[in-house]
Image (cartoon, rainbow, N blue to C red):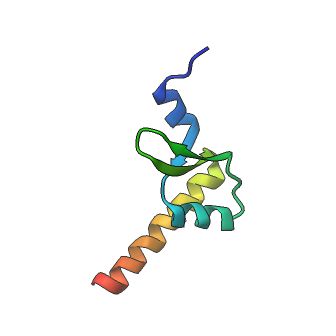
Amino acid sequence: MQISNDELKERFFFCFSRPLADFLEKRGLSYIIKATDKKADRVYTLFDKTPALESALADWAKAKEEWRAKWFY
């Protein structure tokens, strides 16, 4: 059985940002795997999409906007 790209994106969160992956881990979220995308030659961290992940991503977005407002007016 093959899973489509849409199904993968719906079920999992592919994180290509090291600072974000570190933030999520510090929030207590466990990743499934760290791997290298062969096409992009970039490391990513794969997380299961859960309500806890969605909440942490919202917190990340808020903190990022606060940081930008502070430093870039």
Give the camera-side residue of 11 and 36: 36
Q: Residue furthest left?
A: 73
**Residue at figure coordinates x 41%, y 78% from the top left:** 66
Q: Measured along the vertical axis of the image, is residue 2 above or below residue 12?
A: above
Residue 4 is situated, as x and y percent measured from the top left of the image, at 49, 23
**Residue at figure coordinates x 36%, y 85% from the top left:** 70
Q: Measured along the vertical axis of the image, is residue 66 above or below residue 52?
A: below
Give the camera-side residue of 51 and 17: 17
Q: Quadrant of the C terminus?
A: bottom left
Residue 14 is situated, as x and y percent measured from the top left of the image, at 52, 46
Q: Quadrant of the N terminus?
A: top right
Q: Is residue 68 left or right of residue 30?
A: left
Q: Is residue 39 left or right of residue 47?
A: left
Q: Is residue 66 left or right of residue 47?
A: left
Q: Measured along the vertical axis of the image, is residue 47 above or below residue 67?
A: above
**Residue at figure coordinates x 65%, y 54% from the top left:** 52
